[in-house]
Amino acid sequence: MDKEIVDQIITDYMKKIYGFAYAKIKNIDVAEDLSSRIIFEVYKSLLKKENVLNVSSYIYRVASNVYSQFIIDEFNEGQIKVNATKKTQVAAFNKDKTLSNIRKEIAYLSNIQREIIVMYYFEKLKQKEIAERLNISLANVKWHLFEAKNQMKEWFEEENKSELKTKKIIFSDIKRIGHINTLSIDISSFFKKSISQNIAYVAYEKPKTILEIARELDCPLAYVEDEMYHLVNNGFVDKVSANKYLTNMYITDINIENKKKIEAVLNQYIDYICDSYFNILFKTMKNYITLPNKAIYIPENDFNFLMWSIVSYACNKLVDVNMVIEKIDKYYVKTRDDGNYMVTAFVDKNRHISSDSNPQTHLSLVSCPLSQKFPNSYLKYYPEPMLILSWNVGNDKKPIILRAFSSEYSPINEKQDFITNMSSLNLYNFICGKFTNEATNIDNFISMFEDGSLQVNREVKAEKKPYVNLVVTTLSEKELDALLPPLPIELQKICRKIDDELFEINKAYFPAHKQDLCRLMNQNSLSKMKSFILECLIKKGKLKPVKKRQKKTVNMILFCDVLPD
């Protein structure tokens, strides 16, 4: 083949030959060497050929042969270029990873250390210039620079030893125990961000510094600092010695094994408790409501509805709850919303949040709403304490008190609308006959019908007048307590035994500094068994399921100075 034709072919295919070589080797220098060999062999062979029907196919075949020989030659010399290429790729990857880790480690430094590192290494400022810009001494700059480099070096060494993989958690529910101001902020609003929940959880077992928390959560120090300020300021976390922080809450881990153990203990005694005490309680209340001067209002004269509330009330009152509350009182915290309470939270470890897509903020910083309803199955094992709301209706009258009891059948969460309405005294004014049927009150009437505090019996067509749909009594709490049959001595012993067994089950899930509180929280067995007792009484036929219109206000008692008509 003529030299001029071959020169033209080589010119046309030179880039393609280099592309073939680079695709095989992935290394610029080695690809240039290989492409030179291929061009040389193609040039020689084309000069010897008289005619080539398919130039592209022919050049590809020569290139493949040269590449094969190239690999053999490199192998024989013990210098496999492919491995060198892979090492180059790994080195490049490690370099990118190192830079990423450096950026992440810088995020864990304090504010002033971050500024100094950025100015010194990225803005190329001299240490004296940094001191002038930050208005600190040169010695201070040198110290922070030295300290920051040492910290980052230690962290790199730790990361090379092991990868920290913290499973992020979310609270299933969060409540307050204690004295709550009627104008206090909803407690869940303090924990809308998942980072707030995780900070509280990480600092629960033992005191930790902000830096330790940030590293455990794999979250920039600045975010933890900001959230920690709010948690400490509102009394949820305490700052202890050595710049460490300890969560000031009662956090319970929910798990299936724990629930099974609790159920086994409670089921062991439930029949005896119902037969030995609650049969007597039913007889006592039946005799009382036949009295002409009884001081209890029962909606629709439904004895079953009354006993749902009385049984729940008795579960919380029969053991000396006041003594328990006084002991727990030492764990209450004076808060900025003028409350005095302790915060409790539940963690379901079967539910967790995934890491945020932003590599610099592994925890989501946006709203992370808590569940609006505490799961009913958990309320059977971890019942909430009774909710108490009181307000004054005048200087000459005693406070009106509402007690609401939570169980698997009637979570307090479902009563929130009702509680809000009660605080506005609409129902009290209706009971006193001060609430007229004027058009101006239509919204209040609608509200009371929606929350269930007022009802109309639709089963009786002639009955159109609304009635109060919860138990109301003019008895004081002490008078109602006196009406309840006393606990037999044997049953008191069993309740104390259950207390001890529940504590033994639950204490394994709480740190050493929370053991005393754990014991207090597991006192008063009957309140813990409320859902089991209600369930047992239903099975025995002593209680019947409540009607649909009664569900919102069941397990409530309003202590008032007047009864509804």
Image (tube, helix red, strand yellow):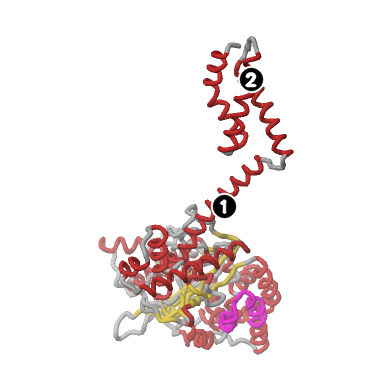
Q: What residue would you read off at disc 2?
A: 44
Question: Closest to the observer: 26 or 393?
Answer: 26
Query: Which region shows up in magenta?
Result: 498-522
Q: Is residue 502 magenta?
A: yes
Q: Could you tell me which residue is drawn at 62 percent across and 81 percent down?
A: 280
Disc nearer the start of the sequence (1/2)? 2
Categorize mark 2 by other alpha carbons within 10 Å: few (<14), some (14-19), many (20+).
few
Q: What residue would you read off at disc 1?
A: 94
Categorize mark 1 by other alpha carbons within 10 Å: few (<14), some (14-19), many (20+).
few
Q: Give the x, y percent position of residue 263.
A: 67, 71
Q: Where on the picture, by quarter, is residue 77? A: top right
- Check the picture and name the quadrant holding the N terminus: top right
Q: What amino acid does circle 2 point to?
A: Lys
Question: Closest to the observer: 80 or 20?
Answer: 80
Q: Give the x, y percent position of residue 312.
A: 54, 75
Q: Give the x, y percent position of residue 288.
A: 52, 82
